[in-house]
Image (tube, rainbow, N blue to C red):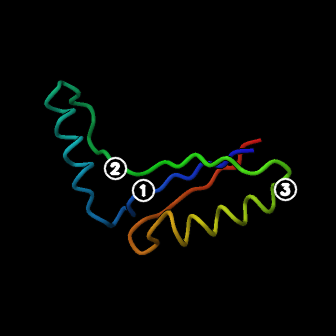
Amino acid sequence: MKARVFVTPKSTVLDPQGQTVRSALNGLGFAAIAEVRQGKFFEIALTPGTTREKAQSDIETAAHDVLANPVIEEYRVEILD
């Protein structure tokens, strides 16, 4: 079983890296791109035999406490079989 955690800045938080990427893409001719938000992606392998409920609980806790800063970032967790 694997888990994926996507972490991005909250929509109310300035994202200078995303703005730089958008500007570069626009300069390369991708004029239709209006906004870019840059974040982090974690792919986590879970120990065999871990239940889906335990995996969801542990990964949610890890995402909230360690992988993301909940003051300025939001996260989404996916559990894959």
Looking at the image, is 38 positioned above or below residue 60?
above
Q: Among all residues in the image, which is located at the extreme bottom?
A: 71
- Identify the amino acid type marked 1: Thr
What quarter of the picture does the N terminus occupy? top right
* Residue at horizontal 56 percent and vertical 53 percent from the top: 5
Q: Select label 1 or label 3 by which is in front.
A: 3
* Residue at horizontal 46 percent and vertical 72 percent from the top: 70
The tag earlier along the polypeptide, 1 or 3, is: 1
The circle on residue 37 is 2
Gap in Å between the C-alphas at discs 3 and 2?
A: 33 Å
Q: In the rendered image, which residue does mark 3 sit on?
A: 51
Q: Are marks 1 and 2 in contact (CB under 8 Å)?
A: yes
Q: Position of residue 34 (x, y in %)?
A: 26, 41
Q: Position of residue 58 (x, y in %)?
A: 70, 65
The tag earlier along the polypeptide, 3 or 2, is: 2
Q: Are marks 3 and 2 in contact (CB under 8 Å)?
A: no
Q: Among all residues in the image, which is located at the extreme left?
A: 27
- For the residue pair 75 and 52, the one nearer the viewer reads as 52
* Residue at horizontal 18 percent and vertical 24 percent from the top: 29
* Residue at horizontal 62 percent and vertical 49 percent from the top: 44
Few, some or many residues within 10 Å of mark 1 (<14, 14–19, 20+): some
What quarter of the picture does the C terminus occupy? top right
Tell me which corner region of the image, top left, top right, bottom left or bottom right, holds residue 55.
bottom right
Position of residue 16 in the picture relative to residue 75 (left or right): left
- Identify the amino acid type marked 3: Thr
Gap in Å between the C-alphas at discs 1 and 3?
A: 27 Å
- For the residue pair 72 and 45, the one nearer the viewer reads as 45
Q: In the rendered image, which residue does mark 1 sit on?
A: 8
Q: Secondary structure at mark 1?
A: strand
Q: Secondary structure at mark 3?
A: loop
